[in-house]
Amino acid sequence: MAQVTRCPHCSKPIQIADASVGKAVRCPLCQKVFQVAVRPAAAAVASPSRSASSAPAQRESAGTVTTEARISTIAPPPPGTATGGQQCPACKAELLPGAIACMDCGYLLQADLGAETEGQPNLCTNPACGVANSAHDRLCQRCGSPLPTPTGTILHGCYRIEKQLAVGGFGAVYLATDLKQGGRTVAIKDMICADPQEFNIRLNFFRREAEILRSLESVPIVPRVYDFIQQGQTAHLVLEYIRGTDLLKLMEMRGNKPFAVSKVIAWGKSICDVLAHMHGQAPPLIHRDLKPDNLMLLEDQESIKMIDFGTARDLGRTQKTRLAAKTRVYTEGYAPPEQIIGKPEARSDLFALAGTLYHLATGQPPEGFHTAKELEQSLSKGNGSLPAEYRWFFELIKINLSEDVNDRYFSARDIRQTWNGRG
């Protein structure tokens, strides 16, 4: 069984295995080594007095201990301790021989001798923690934050959690089965937050994401939203499960080899349909985080889905609210100057679109408007590295990566019409 002790260096409570009593261990929090104290029940009881005749027996006993110690060095290590070449099941870091916990993430290896494996570790979503916990823990052993939902849990009487797909500072995403819809596979976003005030703030973003997705139901490449459930300090968004891989991951798997420009243009047209629909709402909606990571290539290797509308928001109904500074949400390289200072508008999404298309067509991540200057130099050369039949495409990207918002296209619909004219 595991027990809890306090590190003598940082005074934080940590889990250790019973087998580690009397041994030197490394605290997963402060990374300092200390020797676990022997518990009183396990300590040897000294005889109050010994006669001279007991000396031989004492020497014999000592010899026996030495023999047992030698035997233990060649016997197989007990379950719950690492052997050479093992990796941490949580963070995949290499474990030192004999380790009972990962030095990188703090995951406690199986401590109960002879016990069955307890399943995949549960990673804390607190960005300041991230420690790995037992699959059965509901609160992080290190910081006390709520942990993601374990596999097999039935949520709201109808959604069975099959496995965790992703986890981050704001929550987790699961693959689940809808038991009331004929076993339909769904994705569930779970908002995890321990602080009640912070929960209410995040809940507004979560609810807004559901409303935005519902408003985009007529756009083919946007995932369907099936349900939004909020009970007490929990909230779940049930979405269409997208079978595929995001485009950034695919590029990295291919050694950053770019996609065919013709295919990128086809994807760009679909993205323009989404942006045109969003920007045409009253008040206009902006995405604020368009990038290859948020585009999924489906199993047919042709179609895409646009995911993660968690950062989307409306611009406000009045001129005053539209000009007011917004929360600064952006990804470096894909965000224009006005968004970085907290004043995005619809044409900010066109900048991100241009950066995304550039990345997909060249294999090189964009560097904001500096990429526009590089493209301008390449386009000025008659025999540059850009393919002649697609110079118009890179010209379009250059324009929409302009530092000045007024130098970009007026709308996503205008970009779409330009492509339609090209066939």
Image: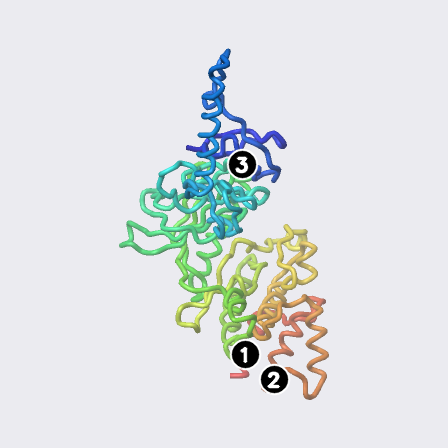
Question: Mark 2 or mark 3, which has the lower sequence index?
Answer: 3
Per the image, label 2 sits on a secondary structure element best described as loop
Q: Which residue is mark 1?
A: 261
Measure the C-alpha gap from mark 2 to mark 3. 55 Å
**In which quadrant is the N terminus drawn?**
top left
Q: Position of residue 388 (x, y in %)?
A: 61, 87
Q: Amino acid at mark 1?
A: Val
Question: Mark 1 or mark 3, which has the lower sequence index?
Answer: 3
Measure the C-alpha gap from mark 1 to mark 3. 49 Å
Q: Residue at x 53, y 69 (%)?
A: 251
Question: Is residue 96 among the parts visible in the rendering?
Answer: yes
Per the image, label 3 sits on a secondary structure element best described as loop
Q: Nearer the viewer, residue 380 or 404?
A: 380
Q: Amino acid at mark 2?
A: Pro
Q: Residue at x 39, y 58 (%)?
A: 241
Task: Give above or below for 193 relative to 375.
Answer: above
Q: Nearer the viewer, residue 30 or 211?
A: 30
Per the image, label 1 sits on a secondary structure element best described as helix
Residues marked 2 and 1 touching at CB (< 8 Å): yes
Q: Which residue is mark 2?
A: 387
Q: Nearer the viewer, residue 423 or 195?
A: 195
Taking the image as shown, residue 407 lies to the left or right of residue 28, namely: right
Q: Which residue is mark 3?
A: 142
Question: Is residue 196 among the parts visible in the rendering?
Answer: no
Q: Residue at x 54, y 36 (%)?
A: 142
